[in-house]
Image (cartoon, rainbow, N blue to C red):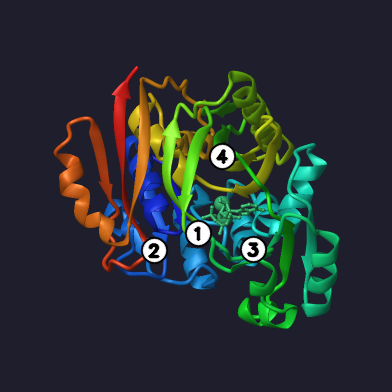
Amino acid sequence: GATIGLLGGGQLGRMLAEAAARLGFHVIVLDPNADCPAARFCDRHIVAGYDDSAALDELAERCDVATFEFENIDLGALEYLSGRIPVHPDAWALRVTQDRLTEKTFLRETGIDTAPFRAVDGARQLEMALADIDGGGAILKTRRFGYDGKGQIRFGHGADDPAPEEAMARIGGAPSILEGFVDFACEISVVVTRGRDGTVHEFEPARNDHEGGILARSTVPCGLDSIIMADAMEKTRALATRLRYVGTLALEFFVMDDGTLIANEIAPRVHNSGHWTEAACSVSQFEQHIRAIAGWPLAESYRHSDCVMTNLIGDAIDDLPQWARDGAVRVNDYGKAETRAGRKMGHVVRLVPR
Ligand code: ATP
Ligand code: MG
Ligand code: MG
């Protein structure tokens, strides 16, 4: 079979590699961590940085197509690889989505609402942005590299707010955006896959509950009115199409009391809030991604069960054997060498046949 190059060997890379192997592909993972989760699930593991040109050359020589499992890879490295072999999603899609400023601008241009936002590069600009975006609070986020709510500073508690200089110092002076705080009723996300032929297939929205800025649970069905669900799916489909995206992506939304949708962020990759698809659908977000990048037709997806996906974060991984006693629960231990507080160590999906 053909060989797929995968930049990043975390849990997402591991689940992608599993799906690829099942379809008959060989997988070569590039990841600097020798015992990354995907290491045991691929045919070859190149232990090197994502911008290591010798490693990229080796990947280009051995692979027919390349993809990535996280958005913080070096754009230059992806462009370099693109000059040698097809890369999906492409460098342009990564460029738009790895930076919150270009991402939110693109969403707006696509006709998808976001919270009000301002680019912030220093204390003076932050002060002005805070004055612009007043009422209801605001959140300062680094434009790049944030995940699990890291690198975010909240404003709106009056006396408790850090001074602009202090806030910028806390995020290391990184280029940032200030966005208005959204008083949402709930959060949902839609996982969509677009094939090389432009076919788009979206999964239904999951309702996402966060704890301490980290995704704790995804629930399907999400319990919202079907009109709101259709709206979210249509917006996500429009985004994938306008990005000329090939592969799986996720779009996170805030849902307001009146059903209005406000997009939060795009993940240009398979997403934690789509893990339920592997347990509850006829095809997973991972297999759809592999099909898309390989130029295969996408599969039909039937959801056979209602479900709740629970992340096992930090020590919660120790509860995995307890979960596994329930025959309706599918468990997944990412096999990370070290347990750390706040680290995603595994997940479980409890199924209820519909
Ligand atoms: P991840 O990529 O892991 O989802 P992240 O670090 O990129 O996280 P966001 O998704 O932007 O961060 O924010 C994390 C969570 O913080 C959101 O899911 C939401 O619960 C809350 N949050 C973020 N932005 C806002 C906002 N403007 N108003 C209200 N809540 C917000
Ligand atoms: Mg994010
Ligand atoms: Mg998010």
- Is the residue marked 2 within 8 Å of ligand 1, measured from its CB? no
- Is the residue marked 4 within 8 Å of ligand 1, measured from its CB? no
Quarter in which the N terminus is drawn: top left
**Left or right: 63 as drawn, with respect to 19:** right
The amino acid at mark 3 is Leu
Q: Position of residue 309 (x, y in %)?
A: 37, 39
Q: Residues within 10 Å of mark 1 (few under 14, many from 20)?
A: some
In space, the residues marked 2 and 4 are separated at their CA atoms by 22 Å
SS class, disc 1 = loop
Q: Residues within 10 Å of mark 3 (few under 14, many from 20)?
A: some
**Nearest to viewer (mark 2 / mark 3):** 2
* Viewer can see residue 34: yes
The foreground one among 273 and 45 is 273
- Is the residue marked 3 within 8 Å of ligand 2, measured from its CB? no
Decide which of tag 2 and tag 1 comes sooner along the chain.
1
At x 41%, y 33%, the residue is 277
Q: Position of residue 24 (x, y in %)?
A: 34, 37
The amino acid at mark 2 is Gly
In space, the residues marked 4 and 3 are separated at their CA atoms by 33 Å
* Residue bearing the label numbered 4: 186
SS class, disc 2 = loop
Q: From what the image shows, is residue 217 above or below residue 78?
A: above
Q: Are marks 2 and 1 in contact (CB under 8 Å)?
A: yes
* Residue bearing the label numbered 1: 148
- Is the residue marked 1 within 8 Å of ligand 1, measured from its CB? yes
The amino acid at mark 1 is Asp
Decide which of tag 4 and tag 3 comes sooner along the chain.
3
The foreground one among 4 and 307 is 307
The foreground one among 250 and 91 is 250
* Residue bearing the label numbered 3: 75
The amino acid at mark 4 is Cys
* Residue bearing the label numbered 2: 342
